[in-house]
Image: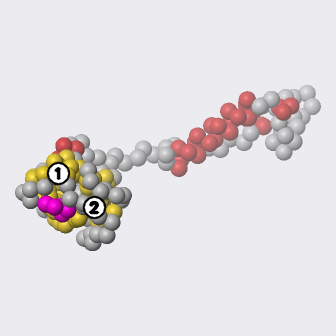
Amino acid sequence: MPLSAAAAMAATMTVLVAAAVPEAAASPETRREAPVGRTASVAEAVPVVDAVPAVPAAPAPSADLAHHGYVSVWGDHVAIRIRSENLGPSDVAASTVRLRFSEPLAVRQELPHGCLRSGRATVLCETGGLRSRGGARQTALDLRLAGSHDEVVVRLDTVWNGGARDADRTNDAHEVLAPATGDAYAF
């Protein structure tokens, strides 16, 4: 809420609260004595602050983030290659992609610069700024699972896009079932 709107709302609430409290219940600090033969009005009892009109917020920029790549699983290893890009129309100052795995990751793990763990089976990676139609950023992860599995489901989505509005979420949220064959499964 813009500060000017909050000030206007506070001024309105002050007048409404003062009007609802009978004068006899008012404390000596807030009650002014009315001259003899005259009753005090609400305007005299409560100072009214002139409110500044609210300024409408600027609309959020629009962007269309897209993530594509592949997942490969063998033994207790998972390799992921992500190509992140912004199809426009506005630039994005920063964005973060989330990778969630159906199986827990090994506790000790070396992650690439810009990535961090966010739970037993989740990794977050920043993609940096993405210019509108300005080329893609590559992210490569080679991870180990807590054990060997026949298959792993990887869910990938954008969790931060710099505050831009993305009307097309179909190209930045994916779910891939990757059997442990060593083959590359595209998303």
Residue 151: mark: 1
Residue 152 vs 9, above or below: the answer is below
Element assignment for label 2: loop
Identified at 37% across, 48% down, the residue is 58
Element assignment for label 1: strand
Q: Amino acid at mark 2?
A: Ala
**Percent from the top left, x then y, of residue 8?**
58, 42
Q: CA distance from mark 2 to mark 1?
A: 13 Å
* Residue 35 horizontal side relative to residue 175, left or right: right
Residue 25 vs 186, above or below: the answer is above
Q: Which range of residues does the magenta coloring cover? A: 74-78
Identified at 63% across, 41% down, the residue is 11
* Residue 125 horizontal side relative to residue 71, left or right: right
Number of callouts in the render?
Answer: 2
Identified at 16% across, 52% down, the residue is 150
**Percent from the top left, x then y, of residue 158?**
27, 52
Residue 77 belongs to magenta span: yes
Identified at 62% across, 42% down, the residue is 10
**Percent from the top left, x then y, of residue 102?**
26, 50
Q: Amino acid at mark 1?
A: Glu
Residue 60 belongs to magenta span: no
